Structure formats: structure tokens, C-alpha cells
Image (cartoon, grey):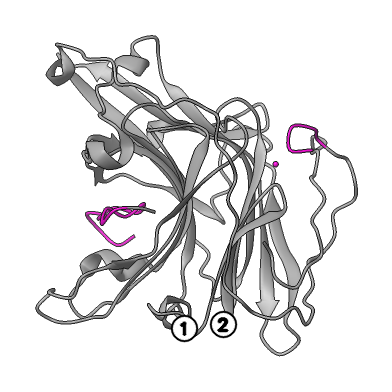
């Protein structure tokens, strides 16, 4: 097994996607000083009595926006993305991934939790917790909650709570630790063990208390048709070959609702040359401008790579 450089976790009690388009899409069937790595021993997060209050941290972004390169032959290609779909089902916990993201005009590079039947709508509610780097800017990221009340007529809209903030770095150049924490009392988001956002029970939209259904952990890379949200996707950045979102490792912690403590459940270092099929499967449905392809998930050099690519039509 290779040696992993683990960023230290700050032991705090409160750790600190989008338009109506979900990171998860509509499956056709059910289904990390930040730039310096540390070898400090990992700690198990624990809880304390810090008051539960909503929190938003603003981080200045000095990275310029991406621009779309127009192409005349967009329709001459087929476009492919990737989704790493977790098989485990979770109710609460802490979820971490050390990643290098993608940001080309039109892209969505993500990590999220998702109630698997959400896409069915109708009598099924929607539960989703997102971290997304969008194609508009590699120095910005979006956290989001998506919820929806069920109704048979499919008229109830999805409720979202997008928050965009800067990283203070270019998320496509180096690896950084992304994390979110989900408990009955709060949901929070972190970058390199720094809390950026915390939503709590009692907020206007009532999303934290609504988030009670089991969810799977997922990562995906795709291209949106919503140019106002992600920038216009033309595929020009793929002319020299695929672009990859890289995952160095994933760590999952369970949450004890009585003691309010976290316990490490498992970690995937992506050793070897194949996915651990105990924990993962591969998405194979359409996500707006791309088709998710199993071939666009590659495990090599101790990383899991999600690719976005194009292929000339015959």
C-alpha cells in the first residue's frame, strides 16, 4: 500500500449545487498552509458544545474567469463524462476527499451525497448535499443543499441554497481536502479543514431538518447546458485529450447521535488498478451535454480519475 499524505483534521464539534440542475442528474435507472502536505497522524473528529449558529466565510478569489472558446464543429463529436457512484448508504457522518478538480467552460466537478430515488420525483422527496467547482472559475466553489417535498403530480419545486465563495487558490492545480459534515443539527462544508459554511436546524428553508433519508456518496464530472451557471460548453478544451478530476483518497466517518462523535468507518486510497467494487460502481446515464461512461473512470498511480472527453463521430 502506498503512503498517503494526510492533512490534519481540526477536532472541532462543528466542522467547518447549483441551479435547478442537480449534481446527480436523472439516472435512466435506479441505481487540502493549503498547498503544503502534512504527514501528521490523522485524528478522529469529535464534538463539543460550540453553539449551533449559521455560518458563512467569505474568501477572496483572485483567479480570472474562464472563457469559452467557440468551435464550429461542436456537433461533430460525442462528449463523455464520469460518475463514481457509492454503494454504501449513510444517515449522517463526515465525508472527506483529497482532490484536484476540473474547471473548463461548461463543466461541473463535484462531490455530493444523494438520496438515490430523488430523480423519480412524484412521491419521492429530494435530499442532496453538494460541493461543486464550476466551469466559470477554478478559484470559486459552490456549496448547496437540495430538498423537495414529494407530491404525485410532480409540481413541487426543488428548494436550493447555493453559496459561492473563493478558494484562495486554483482548485485545478493542486490537491486539496474537501469535506462536508451531516448531522441532525447541522450540515457544514470545509476546505483544507477550514469551515466555510454551516447550516443549522431552524433556518428559513428548513433543509437541515428535512435531510433525514439515507444517501450515497458520489463524485461526478460532466458538462451543463446552463451557460449562465457554468459557462458555455464547447468542448474546445478537450481537443488535446481528456481532462481529469483526480481523487487521491476518500474517508468516511459515521456519526453517533447520542454522543455526537464521529468514528472512522473506512478509507479508500485507490491502490491497484481497479475500483473497490464493495464501495463503488460507475454511472452510465446522460447528464445534459455528456453521457456518463464507465470507461471514463480510471484507477492508476494511486488516484481515481474521472475524465471528461470527446470522440469524433463516425
Q: In the rendered image, which residue does mark 2 sit on?
A: 184
Q: Main secondary structure of the magenta part?
A: loop
The answer to whether one can see residue 224 in this image is yes
Q: Give the spatial CA distance, label 1 vs label 2.
A: 7 Å
Asked if the magenta segment contains residue 21, the reply would be: yes
* Numbered mark located on residue 23 in the image: none
Residue 242: x, y in percent? 41, 20
Q: Nearer the viewer, residue 160 or 312?
A: 160
**Does residue 267 appear left or right of residue 235 in this picture?**
right
Q: In the rendered image, which residue does mark 1 sit on?
A: 209
Tell me the quarter of the picture where residue 251 sits.
bottom right
User: Which residue in the rendered view is the most extreme toward the left?
Assistant: 153
Q: Secondary structure at mark 2?
A: loop
Q: Nearer the viewer, residue 204 or 86?
A: 204
| Residue numbers of the magenta segment | 19-37
The answer to whether one can see residue 86 in this image is no
Residue at 34% from the left image edge and 38% from the top image edge: 222
Tell me the quarter of the picture where residue 36 sits.
top right
Pick the quarter of the image with the C terminus.
top left
Is the residue 61 above or below the residue 261 in the image?
above
Q: Nearer the viewer, residue 172 or 259?
A: 172
Pick the quarter of the image with the N terminus.
top right
Amino acid at each position: 500500500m502506498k503512503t498517503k499524505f494526510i492533512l490534519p483534521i481540526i477536532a472541532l464539534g462543528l466542522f467547518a449545487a447549483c441551479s435547478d440542475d442537480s449534481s446527480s442528474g436523472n439516472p435512466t435507472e435506479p441505481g487540502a498552509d493549503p498547498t503544503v502536505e502534512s504527514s501528521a497522524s490523522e485524528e478522529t473528529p469529535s464534538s463539543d458544545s460550540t453553539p449551533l449558529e449559521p455560518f458563512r466565510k467569505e474568501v477572496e478569489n483572485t483567479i480570472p474567469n474562464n472563457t469559452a472558446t467557440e468551435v464550429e464543429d461542436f456537433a461533430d463529436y460525442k462528449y463523455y463524462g464520469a460518475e463514481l457512484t457509492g454503494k454504501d448508504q449513510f444517515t449522517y457522518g463526515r465525508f472527506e476527499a483529497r482532490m484536484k478538480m476540473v474547471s473548463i467552460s461548461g463543466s461541473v466537478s463535484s462531490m455530493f451525497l444523494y438520496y438515490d430515488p430523488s430523480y423519480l420525483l412524484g412521491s419521492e422527496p429530494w435530499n442532496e448535499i453538494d460541493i461543486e467547482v464550476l466551469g466559470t472559475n477554478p478559484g470559486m466553489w459552490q456549496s448547496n443543499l437540495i430538498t423537495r417535498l414529494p407530491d404525485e403530480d410532480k409540481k413541487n419545486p426543488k428548494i436550493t441554497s447555493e453559496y459561492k465563495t473563493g478558494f484562495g487558490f486554483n482548485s485545478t492545480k493542486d490537491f486539496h481536502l474537501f469535506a462536508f459534515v451531516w448531522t441532525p443539527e447541522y450540515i457544514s462544508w470545509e476546505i483544507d479543514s477550514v469551515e466555510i459554511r454551516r447550516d443549522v436546524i431552524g433556518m428559513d428553508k428548513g433543509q437541515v431538518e428535512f435531510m433525514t433519508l439515507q444517501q450515497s456518496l458520489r463524485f461526478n464530472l460532466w458538462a451543463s447546458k446552463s451557460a449562465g451557471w457554468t459557462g458555455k460548453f464547447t468542448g474546445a478544451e478537450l481537443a488535446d485529450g481528456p481532462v481529469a478530476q483526480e481523487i487521491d483518497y476518500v474517508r468516511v466517518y459515521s456519526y453517533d447521535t447520542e454522543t455526537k462523535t464521529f468514528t472512522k468507518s473506512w478509507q479508500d486510497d485507490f491502490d491497484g488498478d481497479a475500483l473497490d467494487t464493495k464501495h463503488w460502481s460507475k454511472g452510465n446515464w446522460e447528464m445534459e451535454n455528456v453521457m456518463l461512461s464507465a470507461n471514463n473512470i480510471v484507477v492508476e498511480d494511486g488516484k481515481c480519475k474521472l475524465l471528461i472527453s470527446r470522440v469524433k463521430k463516425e
